[in-house]
Image: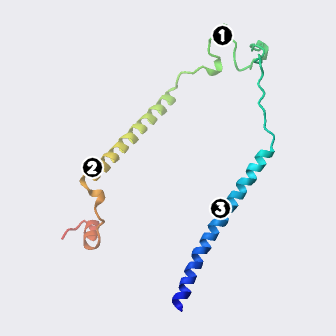
Amino acid sequence: MNDELEKIREARLRWQSRLTRAVNAIKKLDAKEKRLIKKAAQPKRERSVSPTPQVSAPVTAPAPSKLDPLIVATSDALDIPAIFRRAPLSDADKAAADAIKTERAELKKRKAAGQAAKRKAKLSGETRQMPLTGKAALEKISGVSS
């Protein structure tokens, strides 16, 4: 009798999961049907193509009186405006630039040394060793070998 009850319960669980899957599939189909009906009900938009391209008015330079006062007018149109010209670097700027360069070079060297150590450890198999435990770990920590 207990075996029959167990079989019934298992069958019920199987059919319940199938029912859930079927209900979800029906919900998805209903949603898709609604989307398609809504899309069919909307009028189609037509693209308007103009036979002749529209030509805009030519671009002209503004009058000199309307220019930004920070930009100094020069005789040659190809000259760099005063606001954009670079000033020569001061001694403090040069020192700061040198400090940044040396710092970056040191970082690059440290990185390369770390990568080399990691590569060496991989080749020697140190990265695949099991961690020390018990007496061996204590000896390693204290630096005393027995």
Left or right, 86 with reference to 98: right
Q: Residue at x 53, y 21 (%)?
A: 88
Instruction: Tell me which label, 3 or 2, sits earlier in the chain.
Output: 3
Kindly identify which residue carries mark 1. Answer: 77
Q: In the structure shown, which secondary structural element does the residue marked by tag 1 occupy? A: loop
User: Which residue is most to the top?
Assistant: 75
Q: CA distance from mark 3 to mark 2?
A: 57 Å
Q: Mark 2–mark 1 contact, CB under 8 Å?
A: no
Q: Picture quarter containing residue 23?
A: bottom right
Instruction: Tell me which label, 1 or 3, sits earlier in the chain.
Output: 3
Q: In the structure shown, which secondary structural element does the residue marked by tag 3 occupy? A: helix
Q: CA distance from mark 1 to mark 3?
A: 71 Å
Left or right, 137 with reference to 68: left
Of marks 3 and 2, the one in the foreground? 3
**Residue situated in front as seen by the camera: 35 or 104:** 35
Of marks 1 and 3, the one in the foreground? 3
Instruction: Tell me: residue 44, above or below residue 4.
Output: above
Kindly identify which numbered label has been placed on residue 47. none
Kindly identify which residue carries mark 3. Answer: 25
Mark 1 belongs to which amino acid?
Answer: Ala
Mark 2 belongs to which amino acid?
Answer: Lys
Q: Residue at x 81, y 40 (%)?
A: 43
